[in-house]
Image (spheres, rainbow, N blue to C red):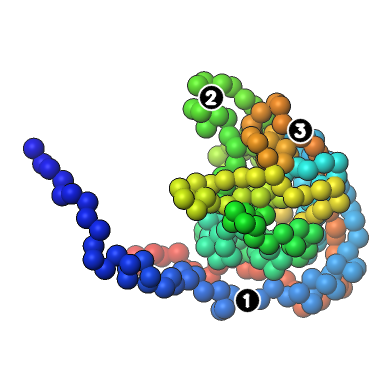
Amino acid sequence: MHRPFPFQTPPDAAARRAVAPVICYPTETLPAPDSATYARARQSARKIGSVTVPAREGRAFRVPAGGFFRISCTEGPQVGDLNLFSAEDPRERFYSGKTRALHGTHLGVGDRMWSVFPWLRPMATLVADTLGWYGVDAFGGRVHDVIGTRCDPYTHWLLSGGGQYHHCCHSNLTRALSDAGVEGAEALVHDVLNVFMCTGFTADTGQYFMKASPVRPGDYLEFFAEIELLGVLSACPGGDCSAEHSSDTAACHPLEVEIWETPAEALAGWAPPRPNGYDGTHGR
């Protein structure tokens, strides 16, 4: 019978732990967001619509390329789960993992939401955040993460011993995308930007945690649409995520999405980013 070697701490353990980290994806060579164009466009943009996302539900919205969309807290502390798709081809959708690798675990002003392979291009750029003051708290918590997946009925079934719950964010997003006319919606729903959610990892066990969101009525995130977008947003059934999610007991509130269109003359010199230039041969 094989007997494993007893665990031993190597004599150079401290030196190994002290090795300095290296940033995996230095972003200095990425094209910088054109803040001057965004500011000029925002001054000229006109509001063309709004969508109310009811508590514990999901809704779809569309944004023209070069326009803006704003997600607002309106009635009480509430987090939301956001998916983005190309309005021309919903197979092109938000890639949270690569966005996290490029910008970090939580997004701030100037960061972008990138699309999946083979497109890998900016879909939206975060241009305003009224929670930018929050920073990092004593627990390591930050707002607007791209590390959580989304609450879903499959994990709920596992953890609840077989419970059926249909208003998890995954189901909300699936219904909203299907209602927008997209076939095969569930297969296209993907890991989200957790809007307003305050999250991090515990220092001792490395577990993903959530805590009460600092969002209050009047707070918002605003994005510039780099391409024509179809978005779906779920008002999470966890409310402000101070205690639980996927339940009918948490206090929940609606969210508001407002959409602006920018006149062509205010976008002079700007064009939507082209799909990624890799030739797709993979060495064949």
Q: Which residue is mark 2?
A: 160
Foreground label between 1 and 3: 3
Q: CA distance from mark 1 to mark 3?
A: 42 Å
Sequence-earlier tag: 1 or 3 = 1
Identify residue type, mark 1. Answer: Pro
**Is 1 left, or right, of 169 in this rendering?**
left
Q: What is the number of the mark on residue 219?
A: none
Report the label total: 3
Q: Is mark 1 in CB contact (under 8 Å) with mark 3?
A: no
- Quadrant in which residue 209 is drawn: top right
Going 59% across and 75% down the picture, which residue do you hit? 30
Going 73% across and 75% down the picture, which residue do you hit? 34
- Indicate the quadrant containing the N terminus: top left, top right, bottom left or bottom right: top left
Q: Which residue is mark 3?
A: 251
Q: Percent position (x, y) of residue 110? A: 69, 68
Q: CA distance from mark 1 to mark 2?
A: 46 Å
Q: Secondary structure at mark 2?
A: helix
**Is 181 left, or right, of 158 in this rendering?**
right
Q: Percent position (x, y) of residue 89? A: 63, 51
Identify residue type, mark 3. Answer: Ala
Foreground label between 1 and 2: 2
Identify residue type, mark 2. Answer: Ser
Q: CA distance from mark 3 to mark 2?
A: 20 Å
Q: Nearer the viewer, residue 173 or 177?
A: 173
